[in-house]
Amino acid sequence: MTFFEFYARIPVIMSRKYNPTDSLIYKNIDLDSDKRIVFLSGYGIEICKQREGFVRRFALNSGVSYLALDYTKYLESDPKNMDTVFTKTMEILSNLSPKERLFLCGPCFGGMMALRTASKIPERVGGVIAIAPAYETPAFSWIEKADQFLERRISRLERKSVDKKMIQKMIAFRQVVIDVFKRHAREKIESTYQGPVALFHGQKDNLIPVENLEHVQADLKNPNTFSHIIPNGSHTLSNDFEMQAQIRVLKEQLGYTKSILS
């Protein structure tokens, strides 16, 4: 790398503005960009364990503004937030620059929120990536199956005489997750957004069956929706730890052939 190539990188780095965060906003970073990647977290585990950092690094290295919303922290901070989660999400996005094109990416609950958000503000969204989205269509019921799966997991822990605190934590997790699914995953997503959508699902997802993928795609009625089944992938797609497949799609949606800083 020459001196001039190195020096050209400095304006992108220096122009970053780190905005205040709260119980829902995990990261909010402005760059001199007309695009913004928005990571919408899944629910139930810490956002840092959802590999959000890899998406953030891609955004910043590409000179793109970035926002990450932490639904686990938000929903656990106050039970009343269950009723305001979508309204609060839309409020945050409405406060962003109207000139920005939004690229939404999220796993599970966050994937459903990405699809729902795109349907509400289709004119602002440039692309969506939804990983095992927690969306139940009338054509395929899976929430009861998810509940049964979590119940069996708790039973296995009890048979193994696992620490009682861990079991109680799992019981509480099951109750809240299924409640979240029942209250939000069954709300109809209108087919107003017709931009690019990439659906990812692990072949061996034990929480949301991989069969749900085809039903979500059919329900969206969007010819620009493409499905990707990850062989041997779990619900969290842990066999692609750095989320390389999703980031490749993000590159395509953003229109970049390579990173600005590469």
Image (tube, grey):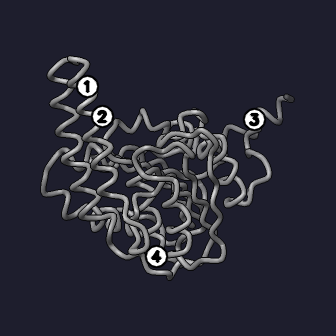
The residue that appears at 56% across and 57% down in the rendered structure is 129
- In the structure shown, which secondary structural element does the residue marked by tag 1 occupy? helix
Image mark for residue 119: 4
Which quadrant of the figure contains the C terminus?
top right
x 67%, y 54%: residue: 249
Which residue is the site of mark 2?
Answer: 153
* Residue type at tag 2: Arg
Q: Label 3: few (<14), some or many (≥20) within 10 Å?
A: few
Q: Secondary structure at mark 2?
A: helix
Residue type (three-letter) at the residue carrying disc 3: Tyr
- Between the residue at mark 1 and the residue at mark 2, the CA separation in whole angstroms equals 6 Å
Q: Disc 1 versus disc 3: distance between alpha carbons?
A: 56 Å
* Dot 4 or dot 1, earlier in sequence: 4
Residue that numbered label 1 is attached to: 157
Q: Residue at x 59, y 55 (%)?
A: 32
**Which of labels 3 and 4 is toward the front?**
4
Tell me residue 206's x, y (percent): 43, 43
Rendered view: 91 above or below 17: below
Q: Nearer the viewer, mark 2 or mark 4?
A: 2
> Residue 95: x, y in percent?
38, 66
Between 81 and 175, the one nearer to me in the picture = 175
Circles 1 and 2 in contact, beta carbons < 8 Å: yes
